[in-house]
Image: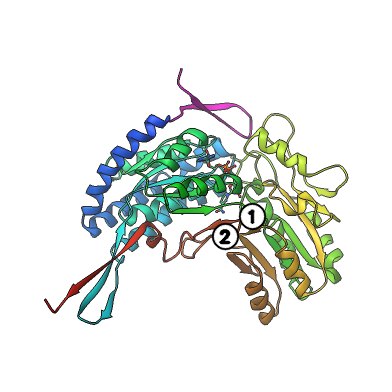
């Protein structure tokens, strides 16, 4: 019997779908089909490719509610977040479509002739996505890759194949050529591994855990295959004594509880200047306790379940009995529920303070001065995001430059915007996605010199 993926509703634990898992042979066949589709696509007029991508965006927009409901069902996202995620796919496609006709090379002054560069598509791109933001993260890869003239094979995470499959149907309905965007649900160690090792895949775009990212990078090295890695995080939220403490406290809960903390940019280390530590905690604790946790399909819900029993067990293992914690509420019964949790007084080197929990748990740690804040913020193998709260503009800039992370935010918790580059320092990743250069990451630069002396 062929292998199948069981898709569970995280809010109830019930099976909602069973999806065939792609084999290595399926990957082979998909790559052959994609290579043929890519050649036709790359040869099409840029204006036509842009038009088709805008139609794809419009189809996603027209099915926003359907896609959002699927995301609630398979990933347990709150309905408000899920609608935003489907809209984000639309925006990513529109933004990438705008780049198709602007993907220009350069003319470089040289003696004896003229010199021009061309940005040529790579070929077939493998996008390997995680379960935590199935739709947006798939689109970070597929939208610019298609816009730059490539074909895409997307392998969604085992737990969340449904929205990806629907997006591929919408692409076809919108008129994108057959086989240009293929979705292959499957297991990481078979379908994922086959994509990474396949000679017909020109680049891998991976988002997921640092452990898997390392394996993928090593395997890509065998073929000198380019790879983009978006990996884990343990991002700081630094609150200085001169900040608007009420505003900082009001923003802190959802900076680590959004998506039930299953967010690579979650601000899970709340670093507070010692002189205001207790006051800040007094402001923050009731807000964490008051977060509405429950049915993700309910419009009023702020936080839903974790994705799986395995994730629930992992989160529980970090919040050991010896730790002091402020806890919110969570439903009992079936489904994978864990309450919002704020750990105080922990050793800054404890696992909960340095490892990525990927659940609704943050630690609050005091610091003494600016240097101490930067030292603590950088005391991690990760470097994805971070926030700082201060009214001092000079300090905001100094600390933003000193924290070794790819995405810093002052007096807010913004990290991911499709207009701006996104990616990690250190073990949070390699390369950048999104932003004005997103399409270039899916091209080779070819240099051509034409002699004028022949
Ligand atoms: P994961 O690494 O277990 O899986 C991610 C994807 O890789 C899945 O599709 C999986 O099937 C596939 N995979 C697993 N083993 C593979 C292999 N050997 N070869 C090829 N593919 C393989 O990660 P996860 O648990 O699904 O996702 C959570 C992680 O993702 C967290 O660590 C989180 O921080 C990270 N993440 C990072 C970003 C970012 O942009 N930096 C964004 C979201 C999530």
**Residues marked 1 and 2 touching at CB (< 8 Å):** yes
Is 207 displayed left or right of 344 in the figure? left
Of the numbered discs 1 and 2, the one sitting upstream in the chain is: 1
Is 185 displayed left or right of 300 in the figure? left
Quarter of the picture holding the C terminus: bottom left
Q: Which residue is mark 2?
A: 424
Q: Nearer the viewer, residue 454 or 29?
A: 454
Q: Nearer the viewer, residue 112 or 52?
A: 112
Which SS class for mark 2? loop
Q: Position of residue 64 (x, y in %)?
A: 44, 46
Q: Alpha-carbon neighbours of circle 2 within 10 Å: few (<14), some, or many (≥20)?
A: many
Say which residue appears at 70% left-offset and 77% top-offset.
391
Q: Does mark 1 have its CB less than 8 Å from ligand 1? A: yes
Report the number of numbered marks.
2
Q: Position of residue 299 (x, y in %)?
A: 60, 45
Q: Which residues are magenta?
A: 1-22
- Is residue 5 found inside the magenta-colored segment of the image? yes
Placement of 408 over or under 21, stated as above or below:
below
Q: Quadrant of residue 354?
A: bottom right
Residue 65 in view, yes or no: yes
Residue 179 in view, yes or no: no
- Mark carried by residue 233: 1
């Amino acid at each position: 019997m062929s292998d199948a993926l069981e898709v569970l509703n995280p809010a109830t634990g019930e099976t909602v779908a069973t999806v065939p898992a792609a084999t290595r042979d399926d990957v082979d066949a998909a790559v052959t089909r994609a290579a043929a589709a890519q050649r036709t696509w790359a040869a099409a007029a840029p204006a036509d490719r842009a038009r088709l991508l805008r139609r794809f965006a419009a189809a996603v927009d027209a099915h926003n509610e359907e896609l959002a409901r699927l995301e609630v069902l398979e990933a347990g996202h709150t309905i408000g977040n899920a609608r935003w995620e489907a809209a984000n796919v639309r925006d990513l496609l529109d933004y990438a479509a705008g780049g198709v006709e602007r993907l220009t090379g350069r003319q470089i002054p040289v003696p004896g002739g003229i010199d021009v560069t061309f940005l040529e598509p790579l070929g077939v791109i493998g996008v390997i996505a995680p379960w935590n933001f199935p739709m947006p993260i798939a689109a970070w890869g597929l939208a610019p890759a298609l816009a730059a003239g490539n074909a895409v094979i997307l392998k969604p995470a085992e737990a969340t194949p449904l929205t990806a499959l629907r997006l591929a149907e919408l692409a076809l309905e919108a008129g994108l050529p057959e086989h240009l965007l293929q979705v292959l649900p499957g297991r990481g160690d078979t379908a994922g591994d086959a994509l990474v090792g396949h000679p017909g895949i020109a680049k891998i775009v991976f988002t997921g855990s640092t452990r898997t990212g390392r394996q993928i990078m090593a395997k890509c090295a065998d073929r000198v295959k380019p790879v983009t890695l978006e990996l884990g995080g343990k991002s700081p939220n630094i609150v200085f004594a001169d900040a608007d403490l009420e505003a900082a406290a009001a923003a802190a809960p959802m900076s680590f509880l959004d998506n039930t903390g299953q967010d690579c940019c979650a601000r899970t280390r709340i670093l507070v200047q010692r002189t205001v530590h207790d006051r800040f905690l007094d402001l923050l604790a009731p807000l964490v306790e008051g977060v509405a946790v429950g049915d993700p399909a309910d419009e009023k819900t702020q936080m839903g379940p974790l994705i799986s029993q395995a994730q629930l067990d992992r989160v529980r293992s970090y919040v050991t009995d010896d730790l002091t914690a402020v806890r919110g509420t969570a439903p009992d019964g079936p489904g994978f529920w864990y309450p919002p949790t704020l750990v105080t007084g922990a050793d800054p080197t404890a696992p909960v303070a340095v490892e990525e929990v990927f659940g609704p748990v943050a630690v609050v740690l005091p610091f003494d001065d600016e240097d101490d804040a930067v030292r603590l913020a950088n005391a991690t193998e990760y470097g994805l995001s971070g926030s700082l709260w201060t009214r001092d503009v000079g300090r905001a800039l100094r600390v933003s430059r000193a924290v070794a992370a790819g995405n810093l935010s002052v007096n807010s918790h913004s990290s991911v915007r499709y207009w701006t580059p996104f990616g990690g320092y250190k073990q949070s990743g390699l390369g950048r996605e999104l932003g004005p250069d997103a399409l270039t990451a899916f091209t080779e630069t070819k240099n051509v010199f034409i002699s004028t002396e022949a």
